[in-house]
Amino acid sequence: MIRLYNTQTRTKEDFNAINRGEVHMYVCGPTVYNYIHIGNARTFISFDVIRRYFMWRGFKVTFVQNVTDVDDKIIKKANEEGATAAEIAERYTKAFIDDMHAVGVLDPDVRPKATEEIPEMIELVQRLIDTGHAYEAAGDVYFSVRSFPEYGELSHRDIDELESGHRDLRASDVDGIEDRKRDPLDFAVWKAAKPGEPSWKSPWGMGRPGWHIECSAMSRKYLGLPLDIHGGGADLVFPHHENETAQSEAAWGTKFANYWLHSGMLQINAEKMSKSLGNFLLLRDVLKTTKPAVLRMLMMQTHYRSPLDFSQDRLEEAAAALERIQSLVARIDWAIENAQDIPSPLDTRTIVNRTRETRNEFIFAMDDDFNTAGGLGVIFTFVGELNTALGDKTVSISDVPVLRSARDVICELMNVFGIDLSQEATAEGDYPVEVVDLAAKVAGYAGADAHEAVDALLEARTKARAEKNFAVADAVRDGLTGLGFTVEDTPQGPRVTFGD
Ligand code: AMP
Ligand code: ZN
């Protein structure tokens, strides 16, 4: 049974799907006026892993994520750059999708854009007016917070305390919005058009939707209510999610979302990474020097609800941790390739048992509110055991199925985190190109492929040793070592690994 922490009830609850075996999940998407930073990426990766886990456990997941392509920030950016808001939104929507692909986040089943869903939003605003939950004022439409007694339940806020927090607003009200509201707590669900801004025809004149209304309209349209799961970053709980839920429940009279999941903030020097603070690293810049799998590894080491402190040191630790798993997989692959017709040197019964237990322990960790750090711990324990069991042993042909299924389980579990070890291990370009020059010089290699070059060097070394030409043999070994390779001599011949 999967248990998850629900922000609304502040407890871990058993997950009960509305439709057996299905998960309807909505996660708020980006406002597209800039490239996303690794803080944003953390939230999207967290929900990608939650989605992948449900899929791996056999659920049919329908995942919807909006793109906010009309917003004050987009309009501001457009004015700064002398472009239209639509051009800015299109450019950064495309960049967002490219970034998500680069870091291995699965595409949502539906990715609705706010500007393409205006009729549904107008319908919802009208319904709120008709049911007495919203009112029009000078072309704006406001949601009447006091008309919805449950307001504040998601974010655990007291409406009267909120009221006093709003008292100062009237004094600083530059454009008179506060005077149009009947109550300072009310928020806009529709905004009258200002000159030069994108706008749409509505029963209240030309205007555009408020931010919160889009998620209410799109989630219902594509998933139906109630949603099983609504997710987003913890900074969205208030006011965005509180307002989404108030609008939806007031309009439709049903529960909006059964479980609310919120991911913790990525921090840098104990401060939230954010565009406004200027302490951000763009995802695309980080990926220039860091493999996506390493960034994911770093994120999996912390529970998704906890704050995550980002640093270069932690990134390096994550790279080393990933390397440990990769080299075990490579070692198993090598052992399988070089298996001999000999009696088994392994305790295969234990390996079979531990393979099964590892899978079960992983499920146990992840069922507990997606404890990825616990899941990784389970994988590492198994990796350590396999390293010890294998040592430098030559294995028997009869060990191959057992080793292969141990290896496959490790790859399968890492896949739940969106890390594809088989792809990582065989990625071209992992070998430095300089090895081609070395092979040309020392082994007479005439091609341009780094992997072939390594093979040619090893062949030349074996030949040189047989001929007792130690100068050449040493030149090959030293040359490879100098480029970051390790050469090990084993009973089956030389084995080469790259990296630390
Ligand atoms: P925005 O485009 O600002 O609405 O942000 C898109 C998503 O990124 C939202 O779900 C935010 O909650 C999330 N987000 C923003 N900053 C951070 C951060 N530092 N750490 C984690 N998530 C963040
Ligand atoms: Zn939203």
Image: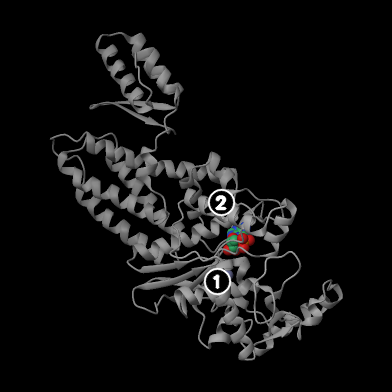
Determine which residue is flagged by label 2: 95
Which numbered disc flags the more N-terminal residue, 2 or 1?
2
Q: Is residue 58 above or below residue 19?
A: above
Q: In the picture, residue 8 is in which quadrant?
A: bottom right
Residue type highlighted by circle 2: Ala
Determine which residue is flagged by label 1: 117
Between 391 and 16, the residue placed more toward the observer is 16
Residue type highlighted by circle 1: Glu
**In screen coordinates, is 123 left or right of 488?**
right
The numbered disc on residue 159 is none
Packing grade of label 2 (10 A; few <14, some 14-19, many >=20) is some
Which quarter of the figure is the N terminus placed in?
Answer: bottom left
**In screen coordinates, is 149 left or right of 260?**
right
- Whether the residues at callouts 2 and 1 have beta carbons within 8 Å, the answer is no
Q: Is residue 487 above or below residue 32?
A: above
Residue located at (63% from left, 55% from top):
87
Packing grade of label 1 (10 A; few <14, some 14-19, many >=20) is some
- Residue 381 drawn at (x, y percent): 37, 51
Q: In the picture, residue 68 is in which quadrant?
A: bottom right
- Coloured how? one colour
Between 226 and 396, the residue placed more toward the observer is 226
Measure how far apart labels 2 and 1 are at the Cα level. Answer: 21 Å
Which secondary structure lies at badge 2?
helix
Residue located at (47% from left, 80% from top):
226
- Residue 188 drawn at (x, y percent): 69, 77
The answer, for residue 393, to whether it is visible in the render is yes
Q: Nearer the viewer, mark 2 or mark 1?
A: 1
Residue located at (32% from left, 47% from top):
385
Residue located at (46% from left, 73% from top):
222
